[in-house]
Amino acid sequence: MTRKRNLNPNSYYHVTMRGNNRQPIFGTHQDIYELIRAFHHTHSKYPFEILAYCIMTNHYHILIKSDKDSLSKVMASINKRYSNSYAKRYNHVGRIYQQRYFAKEVDSPLGLLTVSKYIHRNPIETKQPMVERLEWYPYSSYPLYFEENKAAPPFLNRDILKNLLPTQYDKSNAGYCSYCLTVPCVKNNSTVF
């Protein structure tokens, strides 16, 4: 029997989804495009706001808050749509996800900054960095903060994080990008997932 989650509807959550047995489920441009399409489709039915996202080969991270519907409904829609697409494209039978999504409430401004930075740094924090510069990783929201003139998807809000920055940073998306690069990730059980 599935356990009901008690999630605060007014909070942001760091959500992670991982491929079953840690297998790659986002291995091609098409796979990632299909996941983004699932975000768009779900957003049109159950509006939500994302502050940061990063899609890796075998998992993804999002910092998300649902507008009206439960986070469970939003995540069920995203994951089912992607799973169905994956099954059709690869003639796959069985589940593609390791388990239900992991969600941890982020309930402070510093928490939002820390978690978003952690999410954005994923491509360079791997054993073998995927890119030299974060703005070069196309499957993350970081390049959309780095180049504000790029159109952002309707679910991405780029106006919140910059206003939470400590005083030594310019309250702009450029300042936020500097924050992501200069402040080391905090690696303890309360902030890293």
Image (tube, grey):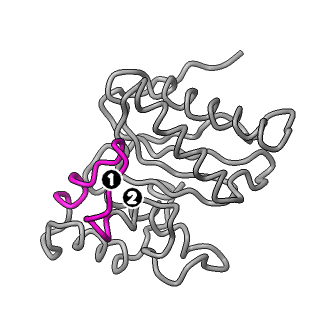
The crowding category of the residue bearing disc 1, from other C-alpha atoms within 10 Å (few below 14, some 14 to 19, many at least 20), is many
Residue type, label 2: Ser
Q: Residue at x 32, y 53 (%)?
A: 112
Foreground of the two, 117 or 189? 117
Characterize the magenta stretch by its predominant secondary structure: loop
Q: Looking at the image, which is closer to me, 160 or 30?
A: 30
- Are the residues at dot 2 and dot 1 in contact (C-beta closer than 8 Å)? yes
Q: Which residue is mark 1?
A: 112
Quarter occupied by the N terminus:
top right
Q: How many marks?
A: 2
Q: How many neighbours does mark 2 have within 10 angstroms: few (below 14), some (14-19), or many (20 or more)? A: many
* Residue 79 drawn at (x, y percent): 61, 34
Asked if residue 161 is among those painted magenta in the image, a careful observer would answer yes
Q: Which residues are magenta?
A: 145-164
Please identify the quarter of the rendering in which residue 173 is found. bottom left
Q: Which residue is mark 2?
A: 116
Farthest residue, direction bottom: 132
